[in-house]
Amino acid sequence: MKKSLWFTMTTATLASALTLGAVVASAGTSGAHFFSATSSVNDAGALVVSWDEAGLGNGNINYVMTADATATFACINSGGNHPKAANKETLMDQVSSGGSFKTENGRVRGSLTAGPLSSGGFTCPSGQTLVLACVSYENILLKDTNNNVSTEVPDASRSFVPEYQPPAAGARDAMAPYPRICPSP
């Protein structure tokens, strides 16, 4: 009888220790991980970050995305030209966005949009139109706040106006129609 009682107590103690160890281990790591995260700039100049994250279980997952943004605004005349390179404004600030996404089979495939920056008080002279000439986003970070998992996302940029092109060899015109507005990538 003593052997049987000792065996029962040892088995129960071992089972309890294994169960406690499994609970502690699962609390330490969620298994959440990003398969991919990409960035792009849409037609409005806003940053779009799309991702695929797995190992999430069920429920809603909250995300926050941040980035450093640079936007250059310019004045374009009725001929579609940027008449003078000094007639532009470059602004820098941080943009962010957040949202909650429902998991499907322990996975979230989603996207968040942020920006573009506002032109602030920059205005154009009469007869010219204010345009977003180019925009860039750097230091993009996407974070799953439920599981405290984050990933760095590649930088994104886009130009919305034609850039300066050197004249072709033998061309009579020494100037192309557009001066450089946006910095070279």
Image (cartoon, rainbow, N blue to C red):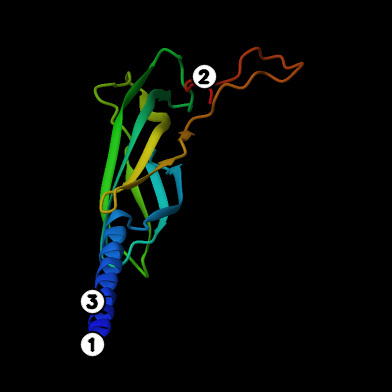
Q: Residue at x 29, y 70 (%)?
A: 14
> What residue is shown with label 3?
9
Instruction: Tell me residue 149's x, y (percent).
Output: 34, 48
Quadrant position of the N terminus in the picture: bottom left
Looking at marks 3 and 1 on the same chain, the residue that comes earlier in the sequence is marked by 1
Q: Nearer the viewer, mark 2 or mark 3?
A: 3
Q: Find disc 2 in the rendering and name its residue.
A: 180
Q: Amino acid at mark 2?
A: Arg
Residue 147 relative to residue 175: left or right: left
The residues bearing labels 3 and 1 have C-alpha atoms spaced at a distance of 12 Å
Q: Secondary structure at mark 1?
A: loop
Residue 88 shown left or right of residue 5 in the figure: right
Q: Earlier in the sequence, mark 2 or mark 3?
A: 3
Return the x and y of residue 100 as percentages of the image width and height: 25, 56
The residue at which mark 1 appears reads as 1
Q: Position of residue 15 (x, y in %)?
A: 28, 73
Q: Vertically, is 106 above or below 160?
A: below
Circle 1 packing at 10 Å, graded few (<14), some (14-19), many (20+), is few
